[in-house]
Image: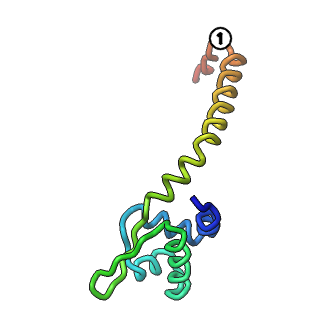
Amino acid sequence: MSDAPLWTALADPHRRAIVALLLERPRSVGEIVEACGLSQPGTSKHLKVLREAGLVRVRQDAQRRLYALDPGPIAELDAWLAPYRKLWNTSLDALGDRLDETAPDTPEEPAPKD
């Protein structure tokens, strides 16, 4: 996997918003423009970057172009992140164990209400 185009594509918050929209369902450029509040030329430029990174694919539907998320690069990114996620989970587990050790043995009872 060539990581640079993927990371570059996902570095921009507008492109991440587009990816989140496409996670729901395929959309036309017009729908993406409306949902993101970007101009049509700006949206098209972002879609081009996402397409070149392999994150989205496009298909012609009559006069419209429909953009859909391509799960392949996301799966590759997930696989790349797996060891880091394991490291993070191990740290969180250790924190949880430490908090359990320092927690009082009996829970405090709430003060009686008048």
Q: Helix, strand, or loop for circle 1?
A: loop
- State the residue in front, 23 or 4: 4
Looking at the image, residue 7 lies above or below residue 107: below
The residue lying at 71 percent from left, 22 percent from top is 98
**Which quarter shows the C terminus?**
top right
Looking at the image, residue 92 lies above or below residue 40: above
Outermost residue, front side: 1
Q: How many circles with numbers are drawn on the protein?
A: 1
Q: Residues within 10 Å of mark 1 (few under 14, many from 20)?
A: few
Could you tell me residue 18's position as x and y percent?
A: 50, 70
Could you tell me residue 52's position as x and y percent?
A: 53, 74
Looking at the image, residue 102 lies above or below residue 27: above
The residue lying at 45 percent from left, 79 percent from top is 34
Q: Is residue 52 left or right of residue 60?
A: right
Q: Is residue 15 left or right of residue 11?
A: left
Residue denoted by label 1: 105
